[in-house]
Amino acid sequence: MREQIAQLAARLVAEDGLDDWGLAKRKAARALGLTDSRCLPTNTEMEAALLEYQRIFDEDGQRAQLHWLRSQALDLMEVFERFDPHLVGPVLSGAIGKYPTIHLHLFTDDEKAIELFLLNEVIPYDPSQQRVSIAGVARTVPSFELNIEGSDVQLLQFTGADRRQPVRLTADGRVLERAGRASLEAKLDAAASLEARWSDR
């Protein structure tokens, strides 16, 4: 049953553009006539179902979109280089929905540095805050939402000491994987190499 919910939720994310995985899982459960929240799949199961859905129904389109998004993320990491940017979330894992957001973690001990940088560079943004769990401790961190070249971008601001600490979106969630600029460049190079080998066949 968890697998069925995950598969239907993945379709809601891929086709209908739901970017809230929790909402997608609840809607899928209701559509299947289930009300027990214990039947809901984990985000890991959800991610696996979404990647499988993309592989079956839109592998070429997903691969092209993912390459474009990762290239945009790499450009953004250059823009925010002074804040040691790291990519997280669906654009890193590959489990992107219809309207994906590029998520970057930035690090600075100056609490006003990122906002001043955005203002000085004349980059429009919407400020907010997000609740996260850092090394098992719940904290609220500054969040900045942007739209650059048609892509939604979320920046989360952390202190320098947070760089090596595990970060979760919820206390019981999984640790977010992070990739620095070199790691993202390696992913893009590997994808380009694979694409070249396939095109030569």
Image (tube, rainbow, N blue to C red):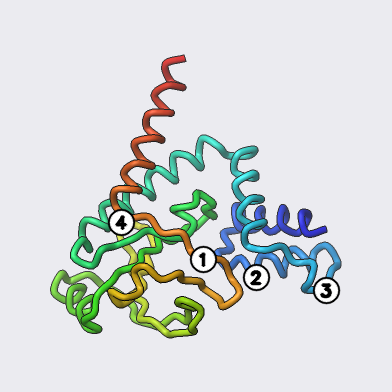
The amino acid type found where label 2 is placed reads Leu
Closer to the chain start, of discs 1 and 3, is 3
Task: Work out whether residue 145 can be spotted.
Answer: no
Residue 123 appears left or right of 170: left
- Which structural element holds mark 2? helix
Give the labeled residue for mark 3: 35
The x and y percentages for residue 90 are: 49, 56
Disc 4 or disc 1, which is closer to the eye?
1
Looking at marks 1 and 2 on the same chain, the residue that comes earlier in the sequence is marked by 2
Q: Which residue is mark 2?
A: 23
Q: Residues within 10 Å of mark 4 (few under 14, many from 20)?
A: few
- Local SS, label 3: loop
Q: Residues within 10 Å of mark 3 (few under 14, many from 20)?
A: few
The residue lying furthest to the top in this view is: 201
Say whether disc 3 or disc 4 marks the residue closer to the N-terminus: 3
Which residue does the numbered mark 4 point to in the structure image? 149
Q: Are marks 1 and 3 in contact (CB under 8 Å)?
A: no
> How far separated are the C-alphas under marks 1 and 2?
21 Å
Q: Residue at x 60, y 54 (%)?
A: 47
Q: Amino acid at mark 3?
A: Thr
| In the image: residue 14, left or right of residue 33 | left
Evaluate if marks 3 and 2 touch, with contact meaning CB atoms under 8 Å apart.
no
Relative to 143, residue 12 above or below: above
> Disc 2 and disc 4: Cα gap in Å?
27 Å
Q: Nearer the viewer, residue 85 or 68?
A: 85
Please tell me which residue is depicted at 66% across the width and 53% down the height of the picture.
Answer: 11
| Residue at 66% from the left image edge and 50% from the top image edge | 49
Q: Secondary structure at mark 4?
A: loop
